[in-house]
Image (cartoon, grey):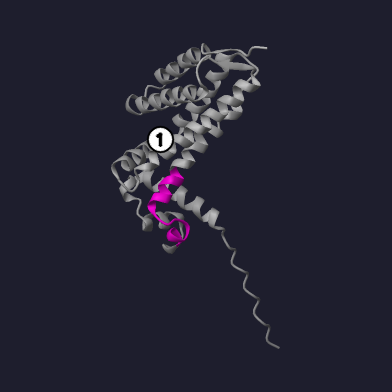
Amino acid sequence: MATSPAPKAAKKQISADVRRERLVAAALRVMKREGIAAATTRAICAEAEMPHGAFHYCFRSKKELYAALLSTDVNVTIDAVWPSVEPTGDVTETIRTLLRAYWAVVEADPETQIVLSELVDLALRDPELSELPAWEHRAYHDKVTSHLERFTTEAQLELAVDTRVAAEMVISVAGGVVSSWLSHRDSALAVEALDNFAVLFASLTRPRAG
């Protein structure tokens, strides 16, 4: 008696969110390896081992992809290092620890920083993408402001300047150090600059009254 063939296993469905994450990761790999111009939708899908149609299923345009890449940068450089902060310790050492943890993320993957910098430059020159850098900055600024508010609350401190101004200082210094380092690759100089900024930033804090 003939045996019936075994039923085929059901193909596992991948959620839209997972598809998007894979495409973003694939786009970053292509850009790091070959440059932004090489990251066509076909190249990205091939890198992700997905059919070409998957791109437009997940993203309406490259603009949405670029926004997702810039958003990923915000999450990595801020949220990933925040657990290193100990708000009850010495303020200078706390800020130094945070900045050094941030620096470790940057130094470990300079190619990503180059791609993100190039994406911002590209967006500034493209009318269809021109609002992305401002959007990225606002998102970054809101994250840093939120973390500083949490830090000062837990450490029972207040700042000599408005919290949003302090956040802008942190962003400007961190971004400036990264930009300079990408040119000279002197890590010791970059770390020394961040360490000294920690001292300056700590001087803007004081114990909260009453």
Q: Position of residue 73 (x, y in %)?
A: 47, 38
Check the picture and name the quadrant holding the C terminus: top right
What amino acid type should be assigned to the residue bearing mark 1?
Gln
Q: Which residues are magenta?
A: 54-69
Q: Position of residue 168 (x, y in %)?
A: 45, 25
The residue drawn where x is 65% and y is 22% is 154
Q: Residue furthest right?
A: 1
Can residue 161 be found in the magenta stretch?
no
Looking at the image, which is closer to me, 102 or 160?
160
- The secondary element bearing badge 1 is classed as helix
Q: Position of residue 85 (x, y in %)?
A: 60, 24
134 shown above or below 172: below
84 shown above or below 189: below
Q: Position of residue 56 (x, y in %)?
A: 43, 60
The residue drawn where x is 35% and y is 25% is 180
The residue drawn where x is 36% and y is 41% is 119
On the picture, is 206 further left or further right than 183? right
Residue identified by numbered label 1: 113
Looking at the image, which is closer to me, 97 or 70?
70
Looking at the image, which is closer to me, 136 or 96?
136
